[in-house]
Amino acid sequence: MRIFITGASGFVGGAAARKLSEAHEVLALSRSEKSDAAINAAGATPVRGDLGSVTAAMLKDVDAVVHCAAKVESWGRMKDFWAINVTGTERLAKAAR
């Protein structure tokens, strides 16, 4: 199976990427070189971008999407939380259709 995962440089997404990469090809959304390193260490292949830039082309030939990316700090502007947690999730779902 070919799996695309978001949030793979984080705690939950990283654990999912490590486990899934044991038996599957895992591609992981990455925003930076630092994220690339964590994603590579988890056994996945980084795909540069963010939730605002995910396209159907990035998900071509992907069998499943695991969405673990989110803004989870206990402070910040509501519009930033909305842009990542709501709008970003909507974009990912539309790209995956």
Image: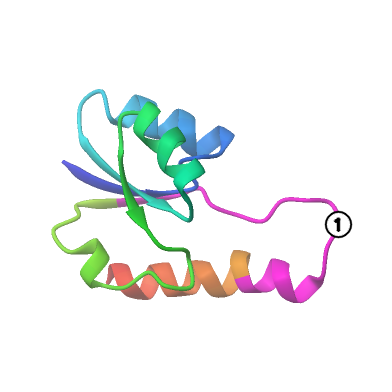
What segment is highlighted magenta in the picture? 65-83
Residue 51 is situated, as x and y percent measured from the top left of the image, at: 48, 66
Q: Is residue 55 above or below residue 12?
A: below
| In magenta stretch: residue 68 | yes
Residue 40 is situated, as x and y percent measured from the top left of the image, at: 35, 33
The residue drawn where x is 35% and y is 25% is 19
Using the rendered view, name the quadrant where residue 53 is placed: bottom left
- Name the residue nearer the viewer: 97 or 13: 13
- Name the residue nearer the viewer: 46 or 20: 46
- Locate residue 37 relative to residue 56 in the image: left or right: right
Residue 78 is situated, as x and y percent measured from the top left of the image, at: 79, 72
The residue drawn where x is 48% and y is 56% is 31
Residue 30 is situated, as x and y percent measured from the top left of the image, at: 43, 52
Label 1 Cα neighbours within 10 Å, binned few <14 / some 14-19 / many ≥20: few
Query: Outermost residue, right direction?
Result: 75
Q: Is residue 63 above or below residue 26?
A: below
Q: How is the image coloured?
A: rainbow
Q: How many marks?
A: 1
Using the rendered view, name the quadrant where residue 82 is placed: bottom right
Amino acid type indicated by mark 1 = Trp
| In magenta stretch: residue 89 | no
Query: Outermost residue, front direction?
Result: 33
- Name the residue nearer the viewer: 1 or 83: 83
Classify mark 1: helix, strand or loop: loop
The residue drawn where x is 50% and y is 67% is 89
- Locate residue 73 relative to residue 84 in the image: left or right: right
- Locate residue 44 relative to residue 38 in the image: left or right: left
Quarter of the rendering occupied by the C terminus? bottom left
Residue under label 1: 75
